[in-house]
């Protein structure tokens, strides 16, 4: 791919992807507002002869933000995805790789880990149903272009992403970033409160691992399945918190508020991915948390 355009270029994954692929074109919301159809048209007119689009842009947030602003998550993501895919098609771009989320998969399934073919087996979790359905719609949109126009539009589905450069705002951040900030700011003897019960299990995916995998998917992943990108580790929220407590060295008490626990399990099978990149080794959760915690400590003001 000679000329690749990345939407969401200033976002969490986009910034880390730029380290791996600095020659690609990275678009942020400051460059073009992707919920405005005319702005998306201007973007494709500005960057002609695009070989491919890596579509990462979207409105994202943690469980609290999803619960409080479901309209924003659905409306913004549906518009962004619709305009980007359609303008790519109208401008002759036959290759688009889009990012989904495991939130697009059903809330409850008969067995775990789920596989790519399970995406339509039930509704997403109520705690982020708007975001989940907007991502599932992106998958349907991509396959519609494959069927009608024979384009190579495909999707990948990462598990929960964390790492350096994430949003550490306590009102909008995901679990790991919020956890790291809380431990960083805590003093010995403090009590730290977390959402839920600590029982749910999560596959936490280190962002730099995903940044290395995306270019491979752009070249190799061309089918109608939403390939799952997730590590083997599936760790409880409580155990993850204990890891971070050890890393921080803080003598603090942990409390769970019992609210908004989210899905108990949402782990996906990575069999297809492993066949594609059998030599790839994921960063262990404890190692990734240590890297992220140290990064936040050094970059607290800007983060």
Image: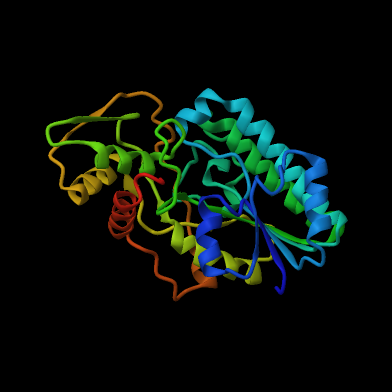
- Residue 225: give x, y in percent of width and height: 64, 57
State the image quarter where residue 205 is shown: bottom left
For the point 23% across and 49% down, the residue is 243
Residue 252, position in %: x, y? 16, 36
Q: How many marks?
A: 0
In the picture provided, is 76 more to the left or to the right than 234? right
Q: Is residue 74 above or below residue 151?
A: above
Q: Nearer the viewer, residue 184 or 108?
A: 184
Residue furthest out toward the front: 301
**Left or right: residue 163 compared with residue 255:** right
* Quarter of the N terminus within the rendering: bottom right
Q: Is residue 52 left or right of residue 205?
A: right
Q: Is residue 241 visible?
A: yes
**Residue toward you, 60 or 49:** 49
Taking 4 as reference, is 191 above or below it? above
Q: Residue at x 66, y 39 (%)?
A: 77
- For this rendering, which residue is in front, 208 or 31? 31
Residue 192 lies, in percent from the top left, at 24, 31
**Quarter of the image that includes the C terminus:** top left
**Residue 233 left/right relative to 156:** left
């Amino acid at each position: 791919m000679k000329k690749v355009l990345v939407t969401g270029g200033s976002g969490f994954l986009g910034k880390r992807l730029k380290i791996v692929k600095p020659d690609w074109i990275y678009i942020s919301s400051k460059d073009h507002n992707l919920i405005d159809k005319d702005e998306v048209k201007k973007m494709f007119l500005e960057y002609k002869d695009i070989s491919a689009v890596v579509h990462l842009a979207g409105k994202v947030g943690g469980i609290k933000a999803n619960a409080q602003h479901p309209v924003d998550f659905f409306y913004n993501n549906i518009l962004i995805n619709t305009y980007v895919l359609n303008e790519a098609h109208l401008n002759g771009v036959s290759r688009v790789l889009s990012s989904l989320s495991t939130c697009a998969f059903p809330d409850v399934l008969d067995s775990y880990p789920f596989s790519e073919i399970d995406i339509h087996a039930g509704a997403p979790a109520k705690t982020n149903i708007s975001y989940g359905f907007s991502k599932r719609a992106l998958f349907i949109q991509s396959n519609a272009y494959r069927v009608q126009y024979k384009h190579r539009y495909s999707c990948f589905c990462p598990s929960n992403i964390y790492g350096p450069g994430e949003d550490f705002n306590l009102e909008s951040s995901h679990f790991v970033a919020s956890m790291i900030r809380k431990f960083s700011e805590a003093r010995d003897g403090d009590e730290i409160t977390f959402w839920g019960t600590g029982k749910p299990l999560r596959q936490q995916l280190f962002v730099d691992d995903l940044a290395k995998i995306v270019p491979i998917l752009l070249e190799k992943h061309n089918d109608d399945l939403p390939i799952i990108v997730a590590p083997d580790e599936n760790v409880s929220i409580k155990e993850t918190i204990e890891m971070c407590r050890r890393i921080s060295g803080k003598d603090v008490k942990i409390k769970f508020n019992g609210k908004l626990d989210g899905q108990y399990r949402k782990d996906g099978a990575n069999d297809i991915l492993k066949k594609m990149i059998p030599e790839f080794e994921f960063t262990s959760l404890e190692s990734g948390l240590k890297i992220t915690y140290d990064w936040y400590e050094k970059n607290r003001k800007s983060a």
